[in-house]
Amino acid sequence: MAVSTGRPERRQEPLSRERIVTAACELLDTVGAGGLTFRALAERLATGPGAIYWHVTGKAELLTAAAEAVLAEAVAAEDGGATPQEAVRALALGVFDAIDAHPWLGAQLAGSPGESPMLRLFERIGRQVRALAVPEPAQFTAASALLNYILGVAGQNAANARTAAASATGRGEFLDAAATAWSRLDPQEYPFTRTMAGRLRTHDDREEFLAGIDLILAGITAGR
Amino acid sequence: MAVSTGRPERRQEPLSRERIVTAACELLDTVGAGGLTFRALAERLATGPGAIYWHVTGKAELLTAAAEAVLAEAVAAEDGGATPQEAVRALALGVFDAIDAHPWLGAQLAGSPGESPMLRLFERIGRQVRALAVPEPAQFTAASALLNYILGVAGQNAANARTAAASATGRGEFLDAAATAWSRLDPQEYPFTRTMAGRLRTHDDREEFLAGIDLILAGITAGR
DNA sequence: ACCTGAACACCGTTCAAGT
DNA sequence: ACCTGAACACCGTTCAAGT
């Protein structure tokens, strides 16, 4: 029997689905969606790639589980706010900030269908829509519209973060360059976009996102 | 000099960016986003993988170009409709139907930032927002909200199409199974979603999408 | 200038073999 | 039951060599 000198590299606890998902999140946050690799994950867990498959069916499930973990935390707070409108805003902001902190989450949410993290979000939004006294037939439409808007912003923010990261510039320089490009568009072909260049440069993503939520909420309550 | 008997396999014209993008679209429509491979593309063009790189910088540019081609066609029609509302609806439906016909487009749009196809769409929407007599400071918010909603639906529809294709069931069975799952949710944890199961089963994606557009339009014009 | 196709440096996933 | 790690069947991309 070979006597091992010193403890093994860093494997005190056995592998588990939870430890794997935690490590996956760390990897995603550190090196982005492209850096989540079974080999890199195995190295971080001091094991081989094959071991991971004992606890997880594949990469898709791993990504879903990681998204669920982060999103669940973001939406964990009880529905705060005096009004349903405020509760929806708080919920939406929670998702927005989670994507801001974990850009890979945006791409994941934008591309997942009725996986469980999304279902929970739909439920939370729906309850507030109901509290807005929206008639039953319109509740589905209203909740879906809010959710789809949030997911649209999620995907775009994730893509922007990816682009900014790829060009190794900060978000500020990235927006600035885009605004400059907008201002130089052909006035014949892009009359509207051109005039929005200034607003693109100075706007605040978070506030703009919230303004969109308010717009939809106004539409939901507009017909009484 | 070797005399070639018969014409070569199917290479009469030389390679060109346009032929490559066309072939890429065909491949995407036939075998989905996962099937677009430089090797498969090269085979279809009767050439080697390396040749493609002479006309295109890489896979990202190829996907962007394919999306641009399809989206441009979908949004080519002049702004029809008597009212700006109708024009926005026509525009949004054009995008919706294009994604329905080419599911890969949904994932591509949801994940692209200010690439040119999106810019054109933003411009077209913005002009109608302006025509709605929205005050200048709110125009950016209104156009962005509409675009983000469209992109959110795009991503979800693409994901649903992928799931339905993976399980080899049609869209009908897929929706039916989801609705059944919703109806069996825990009434304590999912009171809202549970009651929406029936609506999920019977709803029409296209009409639901349009209803969301109308909701946002109502919000845009709500404050006068 | 444009094309060829082998080669490089990766992937996700599987699976016999170990403990 | 759980883990190991080599092996399989792929990728996108590069690049010397051809025409």
Image: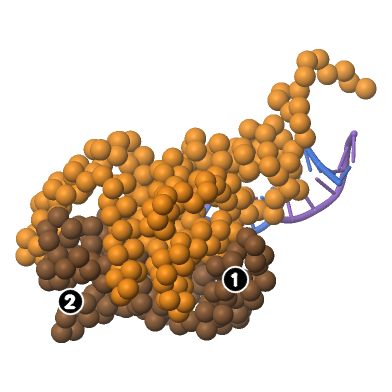
Chain colours: A orange, B brown, C purple, D blue
Could you say which quadrant of the image residue B121 lies in? bottom left
User: Is residue B115 visible from the viewing direction of this image?
Assistant: no
Q: Residue at x 28, y 48 (%)?
A: A207
Q: Nearer the viewer, residue B178 or A125?
A: A125
* Figure check: B71 above or below D19: below
Q: Residue at x 30, y 36 (%)?
A: A170
Residue farthest right in this picture: A1
Q: Which x, y percent locates residue A11?
A: 74, 28
Q: Chain of mark 1?
A: B
Question: What amino acid is at disc 1?
Answer: Arg
Could you tell whether B115 is left or right of B3 in the image? left
Q: Which x, y percent locates residue D19?
A: 34, 59
Element at badge 2? helix
Q: Which mark is residue B194?
A: 1
Q: Which x, y percent locates residue A180?
A: 14, 46
Question: What amino acid is at disc 2?
Answer: Pro
Q: Residue at x 26, y 71 (%)?
A: B217
